[in-house]
Amino acid sequence: MDPVEEQLTRSKVIAVVGLSPSPERDSYAVARYLKEQGYRIIPVNAIADEVLGEKCYPDLRSIPGPVDMVDIFRRPAAVPQVVDDALA
């Protein structure tokens, strides 16, 4: 089993940073697919209240409880801060 497949097998809770409430966006399609596959999705979006029936959080540090994986849909300039938050 390759490392990505192993990580996906072990993960149950995935935070999706930059998850858009718009069905036309890639982040929405990916999160919807993950949710359909049985993963618990936690949307991280400072503007939306809810996406895909799940409560949104403004940032990773606001999520109560552990997250197994972080999926990032943000501009490259924003990624370092998201990584720092994920590591914290």
Image: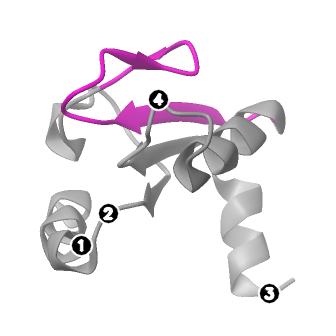
Foreground tag (1 vs 2)? 2
Category of crowding for the residue at label 1, using alpha-carbon neighbours closer than 10 angstroms: few (below 14), some (14–19), many (at least 20): some
Query: CB of mark 3 within 8 Å of CB of mark 1?
Result: no
Structural distance between the alpha carbons of marks 3 and 1: 25 Å
Q: Which residue is mark 3?
A: 2
Tell me the number on the disc at residue 28: none
Q: Which residue is mark 4?
A: 21
Q: Position of residue 7 (x, y in %)?
A: 66, 68
Foreground tag (1 vs 4)? 4
Against 56, residue 58 (above or below) is below
**Image quarter of the N terminus:** bottom right
- Circle nearer the N terminus (3, 4): 3
Against 53, residue 33 (above or below) is below
Structural distance between the alpha carbons of marks 2 and 3: 26 Å
Query: CB of mark 2 within 8 Å of CB of mark 4?
Result: no
| 76 displayed left or right of 38 | left
Structural distance between the alpha carbons of marks 1 and 4: 20 Å
- Circle nearer the N terminus (2, 3): 3
Query: CB of mark 1 within 8 Å of CB of mark 2?
Result: yes
Residue at horizontal 55 percent and vertical 12 percent from the top: 53
- Circle nearer the N terminus (2, 4): 4
Colour mapping used in the image? one colour
Q: Which residues lie in the magenta part?
A: 38-56
